[in-house]
Image: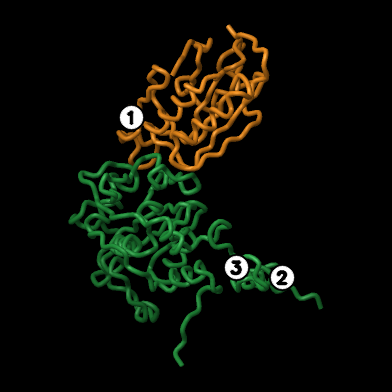
Amino acid sequence: MAYTPQFYPGSTSVGINRRKHMSGKLDKLRDIPEADVVAIMGHRAAGADYSSTHPPLKEMGEPDCPIRQIVEPTAGAAAGDRVRYSQWTDSMYFAPSIPYWRSYWGAINCKGCDPGTLSGRQIIEARERDIEAYTKAQYDSEMTDVALCSMRGCTVHGHSLRLEENGMQFDMLARTEMGADGNVYGVKDQVGIPLDRKVNLGKPMSEAEAKKRTTIFRFDGIPMCGKVGARKYDEAVEALHHMWELRSKWGFRPE
Amino acid sequence: MVTPSDTESIQVEIIPQRYLMPATTQKLLNAIYENGGLIRIMIHGPNLPRSVPYGPGRGSPIEENRDLLIDVGGQAFELSVKVGRIRLELESEKYFDGLKAACERTLPFSVQLKKGKFFHTRQTLTDYAKFGEVEDKRILGLIDPRAKKERLAILSEEKVTIEDEER
């Protein structure tokens, strides 16, 4: 029987969503053109050449190494691209993804990337053409709600603040705005430099939809213990206790 | 000049469920102003810089945060924060119900009102460093210790004594 990896315990909707994020089997909600994603990332102009740190691997003549023969390089590594980043901030108010789950998603599903997890933001670094593909995947999938999540290379402030009146996550640099037509528009790149055109990111999720797709346990949403008043806690808590116990003991054997 | 009051003043903190847009802020502040009984009021929230403060885009203008002019009680002033919290002092308890009604009338979402003590009464070292001896004690607690003088946002029915700065 083929092995199917198991990702996260629990039968709550949050547990199920967390499994979905980690497995990479995500619903595609929108299709933002690649040129727009590149513009928001702000590392290069759409259509421009990729800057490189070394010649393509084929021209370099690699040493004879069994690992290099087994592992196929990513497109970016093969071409010798520079390492670039994309950084996300997800609101605590039921954003579909959270830093840890973006990192799990990256570490499990994206080849040759380096995810970094912080309390309010999450950064992924990879070769430029790889990170562009990974960022587009994040933008297009249910990991992102355009109102509650945004790409913020700096001044990431906002994830733990109340939402704005129109339901957008607060952004000091006003990188995204709610249009009169109900669509969210990206008006600046991830570090706050104005774009030469507005990028239509589509409509945000409704509050109910965001709560359905969220990976955040919250007392006013889905609590981690599962159904309130149930005889047994959700498996997620049991697994957490189990891990906590093993981690605390960490091989301690009082013999 | 502070007029001594014969009734006990109360301090109130208003916390809306969401950050207010300038138009809503103006509506709310005007409703609070019309309710009367205001001794002092402070608006508080995250800073809205006029240009990108750091990072590769440092210095790029943020047009969205400029000219956020609002008109309160016939006086125009510029907002430099995203309003998320309002602290105020009322002359007496009798104005509280009107204040509550004003908040509920003007805000399209829920709001939390807390009574308590929100302004400090003794001068701190920061107050002294910024203003020297403060004569009008109403200014205490209105100052963000980290802010520069020009970033103060002070509203009052009467003019405050310090530099007569009404913003």
Alpha carbon separation for disc pair 3 and 1 = 47 Å
The location of residue A253, given as percent across then percent down, is 76, 76
Q: Are marks 2 and 1 in contact (CB under 8 Å)?
A: no
In this rendering, the label closer to the viewer, 2 or 3: 3
For the view shown, which residue lies furthest in the right direction? Answer: A255
Indicate the quadrant containing the C terminus of chain A: top left, top right, bottom left or bottom right.
bottom right
User: Residue B132, located in which quarter of the rendered image?
Assistant: top right
Residue A227, numbered circle: 3
Give the camera-side residue of A235 and B100: B100
Colour assigned to chain B in the rendering is orange
Q: Which amino acid lies under the numbered mark 1 shown in the image of this protein?
A: Arg
Determine whether B114 is above or below A76 in the image.
Answer: above
In this rendering, the label closer to the viewer, 2 or 1: 1
Chain coloured green: A
The location of residue A216, given as percent across then percent down, is 51, 60
Badge 1 density bin: few <14, some 14–19, many ≥20, Cα 10 Å? some
In this rendering, the label closer to the viewer, 3 or 1: 3
The location of residue A53, given as percent across then percent down, is 30, 59
Determine the secondary structure under disc 1.
loop
Residue A249, numbered circle: 2
In the image, taking residue B154 as reference, residue A77 lies left or right, namely left
- Residue at 57% x, 35% y is B113
Q: Which amino acid lies under the numbered mark 3 shown in the image of this protein?
A: Lys
Determine whether A73 is above or below A201 in the image.
Answer: below
Give the camera-side residue of A42 and A22: A22
- Residue at 38% x, 41% y is B55
Tags 2 and 3 both on a single chain: yes
Q: Which amino acid lies under the numbered mark 2 shown in the image of this protein?
A: Lys
- Residue at 63% x, 21% y is B92
Residue B66, numbered circle: 1
